[in-house]
Image: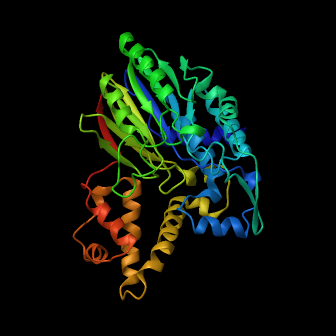
Amino acid sequence: MRVLFSLLALLTAVLPAARAEDGYTFLIATDLHYLSPALTDHGAYFTRMLENSDGKVTAYIDEVTDAFLLQVIARHPDALILSGDLTFNGARRSHEDLAAKLRSVRDAGIPVYVIPGNHDLHSYMSASFKGDSFTRVASLTSDEFAEIYREYGFDSAISRDPCSLSYMAEPMPGMRLLMLDTNTRHMEGAVAQNTFTWLEAELQRAQQDGAKVIAVSHQNLLAHSDLLSDGFVIANASLLRSLYERYGVSVNLSGHVHMQHTATSENGLPEIVTSSLAVSPCQYGVLEIARGAAQYHTEVVDVAAWARAAGKTDVNLLQFRQYAASFFAGTMLRRAAARLGSEPDASAMMTWLAGLNAAYFSGRMDTVDPTSEMAERWMQSDTFSGHYVQSILSEERRDHTRMNLSL
């Protein structure tokens, strides 16, 4: 208990106040991909799997989650929103352990609202990892998900869709929070027709009540990349956008692609994609609402400060930002290296690509120089990585970690 108080005191001292003046503050995190420590011994199979994956810091996700939740408690926002892929592979044990951790946030008087992602339900990938192998373990059904997370949005909802895990919450008077499930078993990545019927009725009710609506989904409402759209954008997103625009939904908050990005539809509907909490720089979103406007920005989980206060000695935790960045770069470069072959400047090209990838996924496209020699070399490369670079460099140079909104 003394350690907990010292951690909270440290975080309260270094973090700005979360509450917007005369308004509200939401914290948004997504794609935690939490894995219970009981499901891995960090053995050979687990290590190889992570090194050849997409850069998630799964080996330390228990510590990242603890540091993040203490940071949430220290900031004491009006609500915490978790927009799916709560677990690494949908294992029941991971869900149960994460729900238990979230209780500390709820007990601090902070409401938590969750929806599932595509990794959370009916997962054939649910496994434990021991030694040089893995073992299948139980996943969750939709009903089991709602029961495990009943205290985190479902019980307090003012309306629940009978056909999915979607619900409408009212975190404060005049503000509705639409938590839209796009991962029910029969309609993964899409909104079921019956859900549209429920949704329109709820949006009509909000409009009649004069309430603002913030929508949350796991998959994206808009395409945020030329290469990352198929399978990432909600399958019937055009219908959903039309409905949101008709009823004046203020913004859609999503995740899924693991990168930090903002976009606006042709008719002015904004979407903010918060990057994965499990991928460098391990950041979350802060949405401050006051006087008919909102400002969004990202902040990084300070794992190193948490580790020092907790008396940890693992150098990776004590220098976590460097570790996470290096691990993310390494996994990406291992995939790119095989495609370069005998390219004479392969090392320099890969180093530049690692920097570009870090800027892209953290949302800092304003820091990228599209005219550099290495950019030109990649643009001439007829590989997937070359096409990937072309896609990134075709984007506008801007900071996606910030966005101003009108409500």
Which residue is at 60% across, 39% downward? 185
Judge from the rendering whether residue 43 lies leftward or rightward of residue 286; answer left or right: right
- Answer left or right for 103 relative to 373: right
Does residue 30 sit above or below 291 in this rendering? below
Residues 225 and 1: in front is: 225
Q: Quadrant of the N terminus?
A: top right
Residue 49 horizontal side relative to residue 212, left or right: right
Q: Is residue 381 visible?
A: yes
Q: Is residue 78 visible?
A: no
- The answer to which image quadrant residue 266 occupies is top left
Q: Residue 237, relative to residue 159: is it above or below?
A: below
Residue 192 % position (x, y): 50, 32
Which residue is at the far top?
Answer: 209
Q: Residue furthest left?
A: 371
The mark tally for this picture is 0
Give the residue drawn at x 36%, y 78%. 349
Can you give x and y, in whole percent of width and height, for residue 75 in the image? Answer: 51, 34
Indicate the quadrant where residue 40 lies: bottom right
Q: Position of residue 48 (x, y in %)?
A: 65, 70
Question: What is the x, y in percent for residue 261?
Answer: 36, 48
Viewer-closest of 242 and 214: 242
